[in-house]
Image (cartoon, helix red, strand yellow):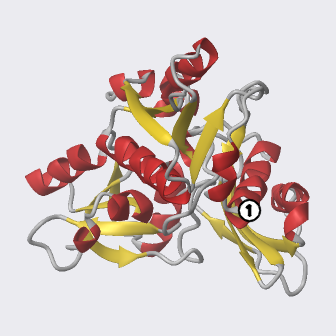
Amino acid sequence: MSRKTVKVGSRESRLAVRQTELVMEAVRKADPKIETQLITMKTTGDRILNQALDKIGGKGLFVKELDKALMEGTIDLSVHSLKDMPMEVPNELPILACPFAEDRRDVLILRAGLTELPKDPVIGTGSRRRQLQAALLYPEAEFKGIRGNIHTRLKKLDDGEYDALILAAAGILRMGLGDRISRFFSVEEMIPAAGQGILAVQGRREDSWPFLELVHSRETYLAAQAERSFVRTLDGGCSSPVAACAVVENGLLLLRGLYFDEETGRMTTGTAEGKPEQAEEIGRRLAVKLRDGQQDKGENHHDKQTE
């Protein structure tokens, strides 16, 4: 009897393929009997690179082709960067596993030849979340939008279009480009996007893949639940500069979040903690607290006025 080959779908980008290969390698290591086949496809989000994501439909543009392939049976599973997934996923295509998390932080990458930021630097980022927080660290900087994969962005940087870029550490490290990192921003300095550094395996609800339990990280999954609950409560997505990062330590889940009020220009950050099993409730609680401007004694809440 021949063994079934599990068809795993990925975006065509080099980073997406590398991340999918990491999951496939972990699966084969956990259960050598499993055979996997990589199937790549170009998504709408990969095709349209000259416009900001919030102008063309948001994060769903990176997953809809893979969702369609899952529904049609062209692939059995898909692997995504969780931060690229919409906050609501189809009921029939749940997230089945979060295998492991890479470094959750953001990083600064200088143009080749620079050892420090010049005066009045031009910093590239396509994220308002990063821009708002980085403006507090680099008030003299000019921020310019940028799209494209990691290598495209690095080429634009080294060609002189920017003095530095702000990117996710996870992608840089997974691509073996850690030597380009000039500075790691602490989570206190720059709260990451919800799901940053986390991979998600998606599949059909009716299918059973027992081997996924061997690579699933419960703590990573609960952290992701808290972060995504925070963003959902604020109705935030690609167009809203919200941020959330959770960690499970010593039996407690600690969530750090950022909320930006478009009308008042007020940016508020804060933390909430509780039992990991209450991940979604912790996310909701912190979101409501920051949105309503509540500040509790002893909690790490502060407001920042932005231009």
Q: Residue at x 13, y 73 (%)?
A: 114
Q: Position of residue 276 (x, y in %)?
A: 84, 68
Q: Residue at x 12, y 56 (%)?
A: 158
Horizontal side, residue 182 vs residue 128: left or right: left
Asked whether residue 156 is in view, the answer is yes
Q: Residue at x 48, y 52 (%)?
A: 28
Q: Position of residue 81 (x, y in %)?
A: 52, 46
Tag 1: amino acid? Arg
Assess disc 1: are there few (<14), some (14-19) or many (≥20) residues with their C-alpha within 10 Å of its C-alpha.
Answer: some
Q: Position of residue 188 (x, y in %)?
A: 59, 77
Q: Tag count in the figure?
A: 1
Mark 1 — residue?
Answer: 218
Q: In the figure, 72 relative to 219: above or below?
A: above
- 85, 240: nearer the viewer: 85
Q: Quadrant of residue 108?
A: bottom left
Q: Quadrant of the C terminus?
A: bottom right
Horizontal side, residue 152 vs residue 15: left or right: left
For label 1, the SS is helix
Q: In the figure, 33 relative to 278: above or below?
A: above
